[in-house]
Amino acid sequence: MSRRQIFHALGLHLHQPPGNLGLLLETAPDEARRIVGCYERIARHAQKYANVARLHLTLSGPLLRQLRDPDLVAALADTASLPDIVAGLGAAPGVEFLGSGLEHPPMPLIPSDDWADQLAGERQYMRDVLGKAPRGFWPAEGLFSLEMVPALVDAGFDYVVLNAGRLARPDGTQADAFRPGLLRYRAAEIAVVPLDGDLSAMQAGGIDPAWWADEIKARSLFGPEPRLITTVSDGENGAWFRDDSETGFFARFFSPYMEFCETGEFPVKPISLSEFLDIHPPTEDLTVHDNAPVVGSTKSFDVDHWTDAPDHRREDLARLFRISGRYRQLSRGPSDPEPLRNLRRLILEAEGSCFLVWDDAWRDGLRARLDEAERLLDGPVTTAILAPGGPPPSITPPEVTRPRPAATAAAAKPKPAPGTATPEPKPRPARPAPGPRPAVTKPEPEPRPTTSAPSPKPAAAKPTPTPTTPTATTDSEPKTPPTERPRGPSDSESPKAKPKPASRPKAATKTARPRKATTATKAQDTSAAKAQDTSTTKAQDTSTTKAQDTSAAKVEPPAKAAPAGRAKSPPRDAPTGRGRRKTGD
């Protein structure tokens, strides 16, 4: 029994990493020409079957730039006319473009502040070059999160294509693999088209039209009409696509398929996704059952859901987040557009899937772009831009930002450019004058002028602060380079100088008293000490007062070794974390 209407949306994903065609032309010229032949055949067959053929092409920004590169155009002129290929794809009436981001980025892995540049930038670039902006979105590397929905809608996309196995109804049941639905996030919604993963794999591996017709009919026996089958595969990989003989994709499958459709003998009608959605707008709400937060949206900076990259790739990703955050700070104020445009280009290129997801063979390209971006950030023009506002805040989570504490940020603060009005840096709050603390200190008699022996407890004379909670927090941070930690006695001494841990709190307390008492009571004699003892220090120990009356020599030398060099400033309290930026502030 004949089924109702069955529609098929056929897609091909076309992408080459930056500079890859030129590299292949040097190392494997024959393979480079076979790849270019794929693009030429797509454009030719789209024009040949313009009345019936419907193709969805993901034409990435890096590939499109290479097809327009003058050096490649000249080098491949004997194989195909690259300008004619680009013009033919843009002019074919049956071709609908899918976007994947300007640099083909894995969107959940990059800073969300860069999404708008990737999405809107791609749509504008394709409109300028091809005359058409993409209406649908094909996530690079299949990585997608519901958090992307508002950004896609704002950029102008009408729908997104996702594997049917990832889609579910609100009650948790599996979504209909042949019927589009709606994805919602907050106040935004976008149509979602289920992708048939099995048929897409068959399309990539080799099929013939007769088998294809039977398989589609079998898969469409049940469910409400109309039925929409969507398949997308790479369009340039493997002999199936690169072979121009009778065994290739276009000769063995696509041309016969289109000819059957022209005669009306085929049970499936090719259709573009935008046309189908205009005629049959989706109404059923769906969700992504394996949805996860994008990287950088939580404090954990979790990438495990999206990639199993080794540690050094995670470090590269954290570095990318820092550079992007600094760029965002610069772009808010007055700036020289040229260096900022170059900086923006480098950051977006570094977010390509080949750099963040592919193997380490592409890591050099990523690091080269990040190095150049940092050079621009640290250059004189950028320094002049940064000077009025100070160093920008980092947008990365704690595990990434803590290796860059306040001390480092202050050291890296750019010097103001000549002639630039820069507000005076805010001084630290003034500490109390080094006078005696009535409730804490007790006056001590002035030591004998002839006494020059060092203190019997040299460690007690060091301004070692009492350990507090911030110090413990510092110990629990990720491995932090010593040169980047905030300067302070506790950071340099507390982890190592522990010969007598139990005596450290006492040393910090005792040190404060004799030093302040020495500076405040040099003119006092023994009788004056007794008078002050009875009037201001009623809680002091009687035995201590008697010891002062009897002999000043019996009193433990109040850190006499310290007057020359250690009485310059009172001991500081334990570090409180001032200057260490909390993530999220």
Image: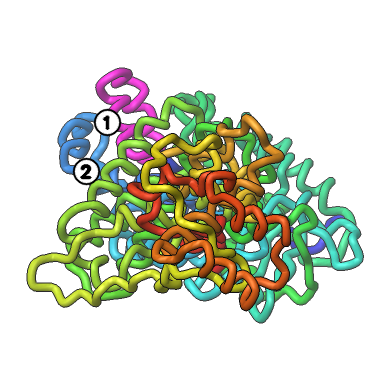
Q: Residue at x 22, y 32 (%)?
A: 76
Q: Is residue 409 magenta?
A: no
Quarter of the figure that contains the N terminus? bottom right
Residue 405, can we see it?
yes
Q: Main secondary structure of the magenta part?
A: helix
The location of residue 414, given as percent across then percent down, is: 24, 59
What is the distance, in whole Å, between disc 2 and disc 1 at their CAs? 10 Å
Q: Residue 60: image x %, image y %?
A: 42, 49
At 33% across and 48% down in the image, what residue appears? 564
Residue stretch rendered in magenta on the structure: 17-40
Q: Position of residue 397 (x, y in %)?
A: 57, 55
Q: Residue 69: which disc? A: 2
The C terminus sits in image quarter: bottom right
Whether residue 33 is in magenta: the answer is yes
**Front-lying residue, 166 or 175:** 166
Question: Is 365 positioned to the left or the right of 278 in the image?
Answer: left
Task: Please name the residue shown 73% across and 44% down the image.
Answer: 213
Q: Amino acid at mark 1?
A: Gly
Q: Amino acid at mark 2?
A: Asp
Q: Residues within 10 Å of mark 2 (few under 14, many from 20)?
A: some
Q: Secondary structure at mark 2?
A: loop
Q: Mark 2 or 1 closer to N-term? A: 1
Q: Tell me the SS state at disc 1.
A: helix
Q: Tell me the number on the disc at residue 22.
A: 1
